[in-house]
Image: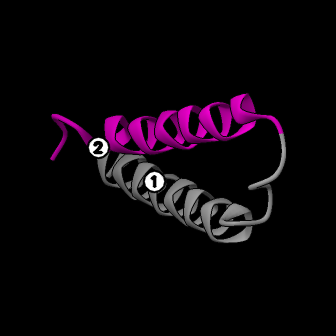
Amino acid sequence: MRQAIDTARRQSLQKDLRTLAARIRADAEGRYASTEPGWQAGAEWTLQWIENTASQLTEGRS
């Protein structure tokens, strides 16, 4: 029972993180094209980190 609850929580957090990353990406697309070049690289790194974290939440678990 505890494992099922843990799995459900992890899946919920995973979904929330992926939704957050998608919203950030959609909001940022084209918005900061004229700003410093490092901003886009930093944003992409952050989005990748969020997505990787989300993937690791359920990796190797059943």
Q: Position of residue 58 (x, y in %)?
A: 29, 43
Vertical side of 59 occupied by 20: above or below: below
- Disc 1 to disc 2, C-alpha distance: 8 Å
User: Which mark is drawn over residue 55?
Assistant: none
Image position, residue 46 (x, y; %): 61, 35
Q: Which residue is at a point 47% across and 63% down the rendered structure image? A: 15
The residue stretch that appears in magenta: 36-62
Nearer to me, 58 or 42? 42
- Residue 47 is left or right of residue 2, and the answer is right
Q: Residues within 10 Å of mark 2 (few under 14, many from 20)?
A: some
State the SS at label 1.
helix
Q: Is residue 41 left or right of residue 59?
A: right
Magenta-drawn stretch contains 10: no
Q: Residue at x 56, y 65 (%)?
A: 22
Residue 10: percent from left, percent from top: 43, 48
Q: Is residue 49 above or below residue 27?
A: above
Q: Which residue lies at the image location 44% right of the left edge and 45% below the top edge? A: 51
The amino acid on which the numbered mark 1 sits, given as a three-letter code, is Gln
User: Is residue 41 left or right of 62 when viewed as pictured?
Assistant: right
Does the magenta portion include 58? Answer: yes
**Quadrant location of residue 37?**
top right
Mark 1 Cα shell of 10 Å, populated few (<14), some (14-19), many (≥20): many
Instruction: Name the amino acid, label 2.
Output: Thr
| Residue at 74% from the left image edge and 55% from the top image edge | 33
Q: Kindly check if marks 1 and 2 are in contact, taking CB atoms under 8 A apart as contact.
A: yes
Q: Position of residue 4 (x, y in %)?
A: 31, 54
Residue on which the image places disc 1: 14
The residue sitting at the right extreme is 35
Determine the image quadrant of residue 61: top left
Marked residue nearer the N-terminal end (1 or 2): 1
Tag 2 residue: 58
